[in-house]
Image (tube, rainbow, N blue to C red):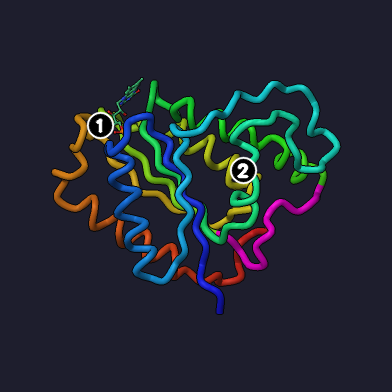
Amino acid sequence: MASISIAAFGCSPRSGGNSDGLLEAALAGAREAGAQVQQLVLREMTIAPCRHCGGCSDGSGNCVVQDDMQRLYEPLRRADRIIIAAPVFFMGLPAQAKAMIDRCQPLWVRRNLGLPVAEADHPRAGLYLGVGGSDMGHLFDASRTVLASWYWTLQVFERRELTFGNTDAFGAILEHPTALDQAREAGQDLALWHSSGSERS
Ligand SMILES: Cc1cc2nc3c(=O)[nH]c(=O)nc-3n(C[C@H](O)[C@H](O)[C@H](O)COP(=O)(O)O)c2cc1C
């Protein structure tokens, strides 16, 4: 059997920060489980916001805006697993993540027309790795809501998450007693996940 492919989106503007640390650990676990990983670092890309121009309203799945988003549509549609790692900014996802997600509108249009988006030939799974500086109870709620809509669009119905509040200083995640081990395990589990067949499609 071909190895599991993972598209891994790093959404922090801070290189080597806390969500990057979680992502590295998760990907190490996934690679140990035999997965092939494509890392997609949004801070290194130029992704304009969606213009709501209607250029994707034909359901082709194509966006008329020519920038680095164009090279993300294929992994978004083909990968067996999709990981997104992001800090909380003003109680939601950072602009880098939101711009990429909004530019998935061509895929949403396809889904809304009843056309397939996922090109993987089996059910897909996703993992959200979140960090935030405070420990507020609803710290990750807004990000979760956006990601639920994104995963629906991408036809990713097995959805997992690992979040850590109270993680603010650069490198704080490295001091956490269990976070990196948990992330490594989550990455392994994600790679090894087998569909029970009960997921929605
Ligand atoms: C612009 C900005 C907004 C932030 N907003 C929040 C917030 O609303 N709630 C919170 O708990 N932490 C907030 N933080 C703190 C970050 O979530 C925290 O430092 C996190 O560890 C950064 O992750 P990173 O190292 O992966 O970039 C904010 C940080 C920045 C720079």
Q: Which mark is residue 71?
A: 2
Q: What is the secondary structure assignment of the residue under circle 2?
A: helix
- Distance from mark 2 CB to nearest ligand 1 atom below 8 Å: no
Q: Indicate left or right for 100 with 28 as reference.
A: right
Q: Is residue 52 above or below residue 165?
A: above
Residue 30 belongs to the span the image colors magenta: no
Which amino acid type corresponds to the residue marked 1 in the rendered image?
Asp
In this rendering, does residue 54 appear at all?
yes
Please state which of the two labelled residues, at mark 2 or mark 1, is closer to the viewer.
2
In this view, the residue in front, 36 or 125, is 36
Q: What is the secondary structure assignment of the residue under circle 1?
A: loop
Q: Quadrant of ligand 1?
A: top left
Residue 141 placement (x, y as % from top left): 43, 34
Task: Using the rendered view, name the quadrant where residue 195 is placed.
Answer: bottom right
Q: Indicate left or right for 29 with 44 as reference.
A: left
Residue in the image at 76% along x and 42% along y: 61
Quarter holding the C terminus?
bottom right
Q: Indicate left or right for 85 with 68 as reference.
A: left
Residue 64 placement (x, y as % from top left): 75, 31
Task: Using the rendered view, name the quadrant where residue 47 is placed.
Answer: top right
Secondary structure mostly taken by the magenta-highlighted segment of the chain: loop
Q: Which numbered disc flags the more N-terminal residue, 2 or 1?
A: 2
Bin the neighbour count of mark 2 within 10 Å (Cα to Cα): few under 14, some 14-19, many 20 and up: few
Q: Is residue 28 above or below residue 57?
A: below
Residue in the image at 38% along x and 29% along y: 13
Q: Which residues are magenta?
A: 114-124
Quarter holding the N terminus?
bottom right
Q: Which mark is residue 135?
A: 1
Label 2 vs label 1: CA separation?
Answer: 36 Å
Q: Indicate left or right for 154 with 54 as reference.
A: left
